[in-house]
Image: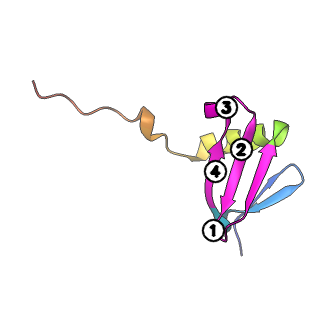
Amino acid sequence: MASLVKIGSVFLNLDQVFRVDDLFASTREDKLVIYFGFGGSLTLGGKEADDLRTWLNTVATNLHAAVEPESGG
């Protein structure tokens, strides 16, 4: 069975998601663009974008927040 997530009235098949871009970081738009492996995309805005962003932040590992290596000096 496919891994599904429901965001508002949209069901996403996580097995088909290639990448998710958060436009808020670059353009201050409250939108997420979801790219699929077959070449299509879907844009979510408003509450749906906020809900998906919140869920992604709980399940993703933030590499930027990783501990920096000690400097040898």
The kind of residue tagged 4 is Val
For marks 3 and 2, give the CA distance: 11 Å
Camera-near label (4 vs 3) is 3
Name the residue beneath numbered marker 1.
Answer: 37
Name the residue beneath numbered marker 4.
Answer: 20
Task: State the image coordinates of residue 35 (x, y, percent, origin top left).
Answer: 67, 58
The circle on residue 32 is 2
Model colouring: rainbow
Q: Is tag 2's residue or tag 4's residue first in the polypeptide sequence?
A: 4
The kind of residue tagged 1 is Gly
Q: Is tag 4's residue or tag 3's residue first in the polypeptide sequence?
A: 4
Residue 39 in which image quadrant: bottom right
Determine the residue positioned at 83% across, 37% down. 47
Determine the residue positioned at 68% across, 44% down. 55
Task: State the image coordinates of residue 4 (x, y, percent, origin top left).
Answer: 74, 63
Residue 34 in which image quadrant: bottom right
Name the residue beneath numbered marker 3.
Answer: 27
